[in-house]
Each structure stands twice: as C-alpha cells, then as structure tokens.
Image (spheres, rainbow, N blue to C red):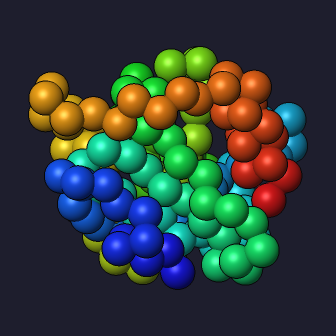
Amino acid sequence: MIREEDIFIEGERRLGRYSVVLLQPTDGGERWMPSVMTLNALISNFRLILQPYKRKYAPAVIPARYIREVGQKQLSGYNCVSLTLVTGDQFYLMLGTGNLNHLYDDLRVMKTPPLKIQIEEPVDPEAIRRLIEFLRRA
C-alpha cells in the first residue's frame, strides 16, 4: 500500500483511498469487462496515484493538470468513473465495494487544486502512453 508520508509534498493531503479495477473493452469494444488486476488508488489534492496490489510495480502518478475531464458512465451494466486525459485517452474506473460517488467527488476536487500550489513535475507523454498500454493489458 502506498504510504502518504513517503510521497506527499508540503501542502498535499489525502482526499481518498480506494480499491479500483479498470474496465476494458472486449468483443471489439462492444462489451466492457473489469480487469483482473486490482489497483490501490490514492487521490490527493494534487494527483492520482495508482499502484497494483502486487507491489512489484512502481506507482503510476497522474497529476491533476493531466486530467481533462471526470465523469460518470455505465458501460455494459457497470457503473464507473471516466477519466479523460489531456492526451485524449480515457480510463474507466470501477469500485469493487464502496460508494462510486465518493470516488467521483474526490477526483473532481483533485482536478481543481489551489492555483498557488501545484506539482510541476515534468511528465513525458511517452511515459503516459506506456502506462496506458500497461493498464489496458492488466
């Protein structure tokens, strides 16, 4: 599990922690199914951090400014939160248990951090593409 005290910077605080799975297209995109890999999702006021429960992978970090839109959808009967990145790519997150509205609300709050404090770490677009490909294969 990701430990906040190990990674948070000054002014960063936890909004929520969730166990999520990604919905993936099947049958040429006609149907959607949950992926097998469960991810630990930590949402702060600055970023979304995803890490598989099998801790052999480093956490994936998506700064708030790289998320263009947060929405709620239903795909193949599954209620999920949709994330649209500035690259145009989309993720669909589903909770195994818990209230999907809490996940949605935390992501909406994260998306609009205070202007005076933002994480300005450089993000390589190719690294985001590799993350997307990895998560789609999970």
Determine if residue 67 is in view: no
The residue drawn where x is 80% and y is 48% is: 134
Q: Is residue 43 above or below residue 92?
A: below
Give x and y (percent) for residue 133: 80, 40
Residue 31 in the figure: left or right of residue 105: right
Q: Quadrant of residue 72?
A: top left
- Residue farthest toward the top in the current orientation of the protein: 87
Determine if residue 40 is in view: yes
Closest to the observer: 83 or 59?
Answer: 59
Residue 119 in the figure: left or right of residue 25: left
Q: Total label count?
A: 0
The residue drawn where x is 25% and y is 64% is: 14
Residue 126 in the figure: left or right of residue 124: right
Give x and y (percent) for residue 2: 49, 74
Closest to the observer: 19 or 45?
Answer: 45
Q: Is residue 130 above or below residue 8?
A: above
The residue drawn where x is 70% and y is 77% is: 55
